[in-house]
Image (spheres, helix red, strand yellow):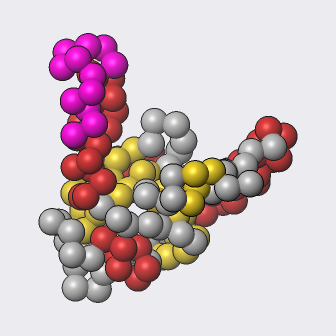
Amino acid sequence: MAVFIGTFENKVDRKGRVSVPAAFRKAVDGQSFNGVVVFPSYRAPALEACGMELMEQLGERMGEFDLFSEDHEDLATTIFADSQQLGFDDGGRIMLPGEFMEHAGIGERAAFVGKGRMFQIWEPDALAREKEAARQRARERKLTLPLKAGGKEEA
């Protein structure tokens, strides 16, 4: 399973090409598609990205909804309809579609931020603001993540 951690900032060239961090490329190495799947976030001015393995799992999970229910249609449209497979070139770069760059406000620089099984691509200044806001929300709600060992919650 791919796990994405860390924050990296890279230059975007005039054609929209940007280097995916080496650690992120390594996380999806050996999957059925040599690249990443990217789609506009429906929650933030950012792009959501992951390996094909997770997209396949999400596709399987869609079967938990009634095929033509509103929930199925809304999630399928939000996640799959706008997703694009962006293959790595020889330099480990992907080409961001113009509409994706516009959605995230990405110009000459892009920030890649690990989110566990997925990562996001942001305009760097917007990411800095979002990270601070997320930390503040977590502090206010006193969020924690319990660890599990052998299926049991640790103290």
Depth check: give the residue in front, 76 or 104.
76
Q: Residue at x 67, y 55 (%)?
A: 154
Give the total number of marks visible in the rendering: 0
Relative to residue 63, is residue 4 depicted above or below?
below
- Residue 63 in the image: state x and y as whole percent: 21, 30
- Residue 29 in the image: state x and y as whole percent: 27, 76
- Residue 1 in the image: state x and y as whole percent: 35, 65
- Judge from the rendering whether residue 138 lies leftward or rightward of residue 96; answer left or right: right
Residue 137's image quarter?
Answer: top right
Depth check: give the residue in front, 23 or 124.
23
Residue 85 lies in magenta, yes or no?
no
> Is residue 5 in view?
yes
Depth check: give the residue in front, 94 or 67.
67
Relative to residue 33, is residue 155 depicted above or below?
above
- Residue 3 in the image: state x and y as whole percent: 44, 66
Q: Residue furthest top?
A: 69
Residue 96's image quarter?
Answer: bottom left
Relative to residue 129, is residue 93 depicted above or below?
below
The quadrant of the image that shows the C terminus is bottom right
Q: Residue furthest left?
A: 32
- Judge from the rendering whether residue 1 lies leftward or rightward of residue 32; answer left or right: right
Q: Residue at x 38, y 56 (%)?
A: 49
- Please state the extent of the stretch shown in magenta in the rendering: 60-71
> Is residue 96 in view?
no
Residue 61 lies in magenta, yes or no?
yes
Q: Residue at x 34, y 19 (%)?
A: 71
Q: Residue furthest bottom?
A: 91
Q: Residue at x 58, y 70 (%)?
A: 7
